[in-house]
């Protein structure tokens, strides 16, 4: 189509901030998995051995090298995944590809649920676990900690790599995995530098298996996210709600994992309650959703009639695999005032470029210079495009209404 699809889930604005925050928290939570948690005393002992002979600033320098090494490894992975996956947007138009990705993620989740184990060669783990002197040694430790922790964090990281590859953006891949690395490395850094907190660590135990299962449900949620585009709207909502409900019931009450500290049962119940609230909100939002904008397929006749009637036109270029397009449809194009304005004043045209089977749509992409989706084009009452109003990203209903008002004004 001559464009690079934004499939599925280009990040922007608050969505990006909240996503990165969630990834950061996920990186911190990975420290509590069975493979990573034993690395905490090893890391502390490595830094602690330097605390007696190094100034605090030197200790901080070693800590920064440690996090830097960890960040380099993961960030390179993220950039590589984005570069090699840049063409995945087109593939993600195929339901079989989406289903295959979802199955892979569920397979990784099964590893975290304990159905199978990801194991690395013993020699590789031993080589990565060795201590090395100097700042370069600390940097090397950070570079290789991912190898030691791979049996637990591997499935989660591989699932994240799949998602990053689908976006095809190297800089997003770098930022996402850099954020994950900060979450993974920051607790180790602070525990090493501020050793007074060491005694407050909960002892390792059965509760870490619960953390693994939590990460498993995150991957199941990612799998559900990937297959959203091939599901009808109603099925999609109930499917996502079912995943959230199942995760909440399992993590909060069905799972019998216990821990030696009292707060654990409240953590379990709280996580289960949050998941159930998410499921309820999904169903509730869908139930309250009113009718959306009524679209017409693109034809020259419709455009000609709009010019004759002196009606402004809105042309929405979108695709099922485009998450911003779906956000437009679910939020902006279901807003009551937007729907009212669309019915009374505008001719609303939808150009669905999910597949490449329509030669007319291929030509329209070239004629209008559409580089990606979503792209929303406004034509004035004479049929000329208002380039100043063109949209290439999601905006909320109030801002869209402002553009609708501008499109109705005569051009001086």
Image: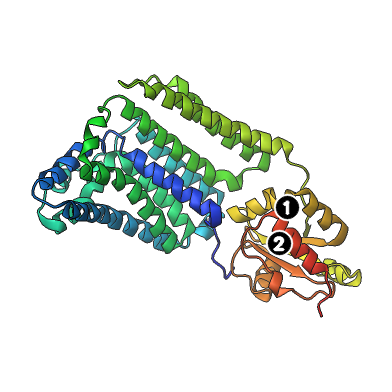
Q: What label does residue 333 carry, if any? A: 1
**Neighbour class for label 1 at 10 Å: few (<14), some, many (≥20)?**
many
Which residue occupies 57% across, 34% down?
Answer: 278
Residue at x 89% of width, y 70% of height = 310
Judged left or right of residue 47, residue 397 is: right
- Residue 178 visible in the snapshot: yes
Q: Position of residue 204 (x, y in %)?
A: 25, 28
In the image, is residue 187 above or below residue 398?
above
Which-is-in-front pick, marks 2 and 1? 1
Mark 1 secondary-structure assignment: helix
Residue 309 numbered mark, or none? none
Quarter placement of the C terminus = bottom right
In-image side of 13 versus 63 (left or right):
right
Q: Is residue 113 visible?
A: no
The image shows residue 1 at horizontal and vertical percentages of 59, 68
Identify the mark at residue 316; answer none if there is no mark.
Answer: 2
Q: Is residue 47 left or right of residue 235?
A: left
- Where residue 158 sits in the image (x, y, percent)? 37, 47
Evaluate if marks 2 and 1 touch, with contact meaning CB atoms under 8 Å apart.
yes
- 304 lies above or below 233: below
């Amino acid at each position: 189509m001559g464009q690079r699809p934004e499939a599925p889930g280009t990040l922007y604005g608050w969505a990006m901030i909240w996503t990165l925050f969630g990834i950061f928290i996920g990186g911190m939570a990975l420290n509590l998995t069975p493979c990573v948690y034993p690395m905490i005393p090893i890391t502390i002992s490595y830094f602690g051995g330097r605390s007696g002979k190094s100034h605090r600033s030197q200790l901080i320098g070693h800590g920064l090298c440690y996090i830097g090494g960890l960040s380099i490894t993961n960030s390179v992975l993220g950039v590589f995944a984005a570069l090699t996956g840049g063409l995945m947007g087109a593939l993600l138009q195929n339901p079989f590809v989406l289903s295959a990705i979802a199955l892979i993620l569920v397979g990784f989740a099964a590893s975290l649920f304990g159905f199978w184990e990801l194991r690395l060669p013993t020699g590789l783990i031993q080589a990565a676990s060795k201590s090395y002197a100097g700042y370069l040694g600390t940097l090397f430790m950070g570079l290789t900690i991912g190898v030691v922790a791979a049996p637990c964090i591997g499935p989660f990281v591989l699932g994240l790599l799949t998602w990053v590859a689908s976006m095809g953006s190297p800089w997003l891949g770098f930022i996402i995995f850099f954020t994950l690395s900060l979450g993974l490395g920051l607790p180790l850094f602070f525990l090493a530098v501020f050793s007074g907190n060491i005694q407050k660590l909960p002892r390792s135990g059965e509760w870490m298996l619960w953390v693994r299962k939590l990460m498993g449900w995150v991957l199941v949620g990612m799998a559900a996210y990937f297959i959203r585009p091939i599901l009808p709207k109603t099925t999609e909502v109930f499917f996502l709600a079912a995943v959230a409900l199942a995760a909440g019931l399992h993590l909060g009450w069905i799972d019998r994992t216990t821990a030696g500290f009292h707060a654990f049962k409240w953590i379990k119940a709280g996580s289960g309650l949050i998941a159930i609230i998410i499921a309820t909100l999904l169903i509730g939002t869908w139930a309250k959703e009113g009718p959306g904008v009524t679209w017409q397929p693109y034809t020259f006749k419709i455009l000609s009639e709009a010019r004759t009637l002196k009606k402004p036109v809105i042309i929405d270029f979108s695709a099922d695999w485009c998450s911003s397009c779906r956000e437009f449809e679910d939020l902006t194009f279901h807003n009551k005032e937007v729907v009212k304005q669309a019915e009374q004043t505008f001719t609303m045209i939808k150009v669905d470029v999910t597949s490449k089977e329509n030669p007319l749509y291929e030509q329209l992409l070239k004629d209008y210079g559409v580089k990606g989706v979503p792209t929303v084009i406004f034509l004035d009452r004479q049929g000329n495009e208002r380039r100043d109003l063109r949209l290439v990203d999601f905006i909320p209903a109030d801002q869209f209404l402002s553009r609708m008002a501008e499109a109705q004004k005569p051009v001086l």
